[in-house]
Image (spheres, rainbow, N blue to C red):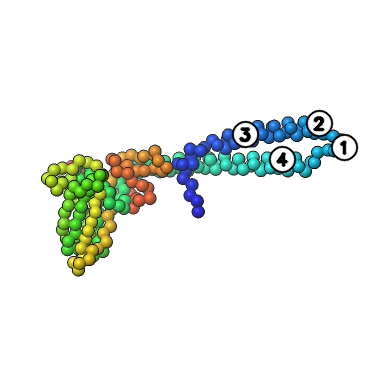
Amino acid sequence: MVEINPFSAISNLGAADKDRVSIAENFDTFLALLTTQLKNQSPLDPLDTNQFTQQLVQFTEVEQSVKLNKNLEKMVALTAANAITNAVGYIGKQVTTSGASAQLQNGQASWTVSLAADSPATNFTVRNAAGVQVYTQTNPVAAGAQVFAWDGQTDTGGKAPDGIYTLSIVAEDGKGGTLVATTEASGVIDGVDMSGDEPVLLVGGWKIRLEDILSIKTPPPPQA
C-alpha cells in the first residue's frame, strides 16, 4: 500500500488547475483544426467521423481525470490542515515517548526504566548530543518500572548544560547475563516544527515524532 504524505503532496497543489488550462487550450486548438478540416473537406472523400469522435472522447476522459485530481488536491489540503491543527493541540500537554532521549531542563531530567526481573547491578550511562559520556551510575534496580532521575551532575563534578541527553542501560541478571531494559521519557510540549514532511513536537530542542508518543496528559501543577 502506498502512503501519501499530505505535507509532501501539498507542495504540488495547483497542478490540476494548470493542467486544466493546458487541456482547454489544446481542446480549443483541436476544435479550430477540426472545424477548418470540415469546412475544407472534399465532398468526394469526407473525413472519417469515427476518428475525431474518438479524439473527443479522449479529451473528455482526460478532463475528467484532471477534475478528479483537483478534488484530491482539496482532500490533501484538508488532511494537512487537520494534521497541523492536531499537532498544535499538543502544546502545553505532557507527553510520554519511548526511546532513550530526554530533555535536561532547569537541571532536571528523568527516564522511566523497566526491567523484567531484579538486577543486582544496573549501569546507567548518560551521554550528551555529541555522544560523549557525561555521567555514570551503578545501583541495584527492582523488576518493573522505576524512575531514573538525573540532576545534571557530571562525572567530573560539574553541571551539564540544559539540552538533549540519552540514557543507555546495562542491567546484570546476577547469573552472568544481562536483562533487556526499556526506557521512556516525558516532557511538556512547547512548540511544533512543521518544516519537514510531517509535524514534529518540540520540548525545548528535543524533537518528538507523533508515532513515538505513548501517552498524553495534563502536566502536574508547578511545585510551590
**Amino acid type at image mark 1:** Leu
Residue 53, horizontal then vertical, whole percent: 75, 41
Looking at the rendering, which quadrant does residue 86 occupy? top left
Q: Position of residue 80 (x, y in %)?
A: 46, 41
Along the polypeptide, which appears first: circle 2 or circle 1? 2
Instruction: Tell me if mark 4 has few (under 14), some (14-19) or many (20+) residues whose alpha carbon lies within 10 angstroms of its own.
Output: some
Query: Earlier along the polypeptide chain: callout 3 or callout 4?
Result: 3
Q: Position of residue 21 (x, y in %)?
A: 61, 33
Tell me the crowding category of disc 3: few under 14, some 14 to 19, or many 20 or more residues within 10 angstroms, Cα based. few
The amino acid type found where label 3 is placed reads: Ser
Indicate which disc residue 44 carries: 1
**On-image quarter of the C terminus:** top left
Do residues under tags 2 and 3 come within 8 Å of each other at their CB atoms?
A: no
Provide the residue designation for mark 2: 39
Proximity of marks 3 and 4: CB atoms separated by less than 8 Å: no
Q: Nearer the viewer, mark 1 or mark 4?
A: 1
